[in-house]
Amino acid sequence: MKKKISIWLEAARLRTLPLSIAGIIVGNGLAFVGGNFSPLLFFFALLTTISFQVLSNFANDYGDGVKGTDNAQRLGPARVLQQGLLTREELKKGMQLCTAFSLWSVLILIWLSFDKTQLYAALFFLALGIVSIVSAIKYTVGDSAYGYYALGDLFVFIFFGGVSVLGSFYLQTQFLTLELLLPAISIGVFSTAVLNLNNLRDMENDLTSNKITLPILLGLVKGKRYHYFLILVGFLSTLSYGYLMGGEYLYFLPLLMIIPFGKHLYRVSNSSGGKAFDPELKVVALSTFSFSILFVTGFIVDALW
């Protein structure tokens, strides 16, 4: 029993969770600064996002395993279906249970956020939740899996940036401002950079598996330039937001992450690709999480002072 639990935890890929909750931290942190914050809403926003991420990880394991993309030539960590630790049927059941839990969490989140006079807003977020669930599954599952048609970057940017930051902020405050697009862009592009690194690492295997990603279309050199662009946009967006919000020194606290991101970009620029990109995935994911913590810390400390 203990071994089976450890296998499911491996399939859930818990190391990916800090990246998935970065946008929730930013959206809720900014809501807290504005004086509109419910700890219970924050908890269920985290729970919903984590359930989406775990569902996506189960689906990726299943989809890439069934298609044969996860094979002996793959450079990343071996997946559970690939290793024979779980069967297709077991992973399917896991996906079904995770889908049901995700939908339940979405419904609770909507129930906590809206009253009977806000039916259209509630229906919109219900539709958004369903789309998120379907997108988590369809990244690699099925003949029309969008991750196999170079659309993964777009979906990661939308859901990890826009939906996560803007959606969680709106659930707390019931309003949005145009300026909020900037922190949403920052988290979105950093999250996209993680996927891009993953795709840069797996270029050779993806090509032989007929999985089309942006690095496949761009090539290694341009794929690296695209990666630099994503990181640059992330910092410029945060710099712009801090300036628009009044330019207090604490608003620029997340710029401290230029140091680890800069070291990361140096290593990427000097890498020949493949396995060398593998450790950088963790670097960008944890740096993005740290970035989100520094971001909200600066605004919260300034507000409390």
Image (tube, helix red, strand yellow):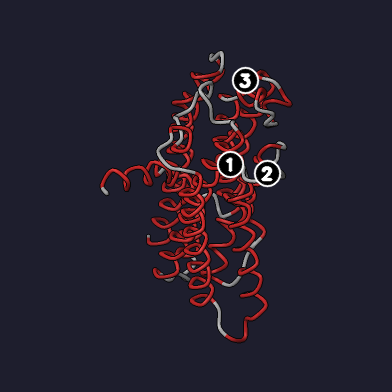
Dots 2 and 1: beta carbons under 8 Å? yes
Tell me the residue that label 1 is attached to. 63
Q: Position of residue 186 (x, y in %)?
A: 58, 44
Disc number for residue 145: 2
Q: What is the quadrant of the C terminus in the image?
A: bottom left
| Residue drawn 54% across the image and 42% down it | 62
Describe the element under mark 3 as helix, strand or loop. Answer: helix
Disc 1: CA contacts within 10 A as few (<14), some (14-19) or many (>=20) = many
Q: Which mark is residue 48?
A: none
Q: Report the amino acid beneath label 1.
A: Gly
Q: How far is the residue under mark 2 from the one under mark 1?
A: 9 Å
Viewer can see residue 180: no
- Give percent across and percent down for residue 82: 48, 33
* Residue 74 x/y as whole percent: 53, 24
Q: Is residue 185 visible?
A: yes
Q: Examine the rendered structure and indicate whether residue 104 appears above or below residue 229.
A: below
Alpha carbon distance from label 1 to label 3: 18 Å
Residue drawn at 40 percent across, 38 percent down: 85
Which amino acid does the dot numbered 2 rest on? Answer: Ala
Q: Is residue 141 above or below residue 29?
A: above
Q: Which SS class for mark 1? A: helix
Q: Where is residue 169 drawn, in percent x and y?
A: 54, 63
**106 relative to 14, above or below:** below
Q: Residue at x 57, y 55 (%)?
A: 245
Of the two numbered discs 3 and 2 on the same chain, state the one appearing first in sequence: 2
Which residue type does callout 3 highlight?
Glu
Which residue is denoted by mark 3 in the rendering? 204
Q: Give the mark nearest the N terminus, 2 or 1.
A: 1
